[in-house]
Image (tube, rainbow, N blue to C red):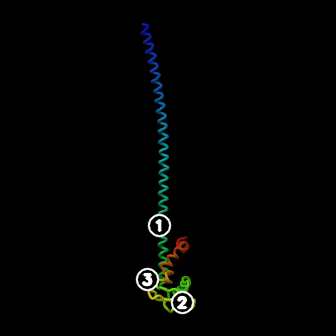
């Protein structure tokens, strides 16, 4: 019987140890599951916060793109209006009475003439600037401008030629140059409240 007692004792101790190991394993499993649940909540909270931040960043980027697109559209419309103003000014200038037109033309010649012996090329449609006008300019400014035989389709105004050098005072060139210089002032007049 003593062997049976010994076997039972060993068996009992083994069962107690196995029970203790199972109990410890259960507690360890429970702790691991609790830690995993806490980590899962942290990860989900972090992911939600990151998603919200990403969403806000995307919304802000879209708003900025739309703001820029809107400003570009406004700028394009303003430029279109300014171009219309210059086209209208060109038409008004072309339709000006001869005396006023020649007064303006003389001021342009004063700006354009460098040596005083250039050749004057006129627009094909020009009727108010003629040989007598060029002669009066020559007399009053001591120039020796010559009227070119050939005319060009330049949209109004004139060109001065001397050798290979050309000074272009055609209306499209003048208005293009003026539009860049006067753009801020014209914008202020037309578009500021």
- Residue 160 visible in this rendered orientation of the protein: no
Q: What is the CA distance from the residue labelled 3 to the residue labelled 1?
A: 33 Å
Q: Do the residues labelled 2 and 3 touch (CB within 8 Å)?
A: no
Locate the N terminus and report the quarter of the image it occupies. Answer: top left
Residue assigned mark 3: 153
Residue assigned mark 2: 144
- Residue 152 visible in this rendered orientation of the protein: yes
Q: Which of marks 1 and 2 is in front?
A: 2
Q: Nearer the viewer, mark 2 or mark 3?
A: 2
How dense is the environment of label 2, judged by Cα within 10 Å: few (below 14), some, or many (20 and up)? some
Give whichever of 81, 116 is nearer the camera.
116
Eyeballing the image, is 126 above or below 6? below
The residue at the point 47 percent across, 22 percent down is 20
Residue assigned mark 1: 73
Q: Choose top left, top right, bottom left or bottom right for residue 22.
A: top left
Eyeballing the image, is 159 above or below 43? below
């Amino acid at each position: 019987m003593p062997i049976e007692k010994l076997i039972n004792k060993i068996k009992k101790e083994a069962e107690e140890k196995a029970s203790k190991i199972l109990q410890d394993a259960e507690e360890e499993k429970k702790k691991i599951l609790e830690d995993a649940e806490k980590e899962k909540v942290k990860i989900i909270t972090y992911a939600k916060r990151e998603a919200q931040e990403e969403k806000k960043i995307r919304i802000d980027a879209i708003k900025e793109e739309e703001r820029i697109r809107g400003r570009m559209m406004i700028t394009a419309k303003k430029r279109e209006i300014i171009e219309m103003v210059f086209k209208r000014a060109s038409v008004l200038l072309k339709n000006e009475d001869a005396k006023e037109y020649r007064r303006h033309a003389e001021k342009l010649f004063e700006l354009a003439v460098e040596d005083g012996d250039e050749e004057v090329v006129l627009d094909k449609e020009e009727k108010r600037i003629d040989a007598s006008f060029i002669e009066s300019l020559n007399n009053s400014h001591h120039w020796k401008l010559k009227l070119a035989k050939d005319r060009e389709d330049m949209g109004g105004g004139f060109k001065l030629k001397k050798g290979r050098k050309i000074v272009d005072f055609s209306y499209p060139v003048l208005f293009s140059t003026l539009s860049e210089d006067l753009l801020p002032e014209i914008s202020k007049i037309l578009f500021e409240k």
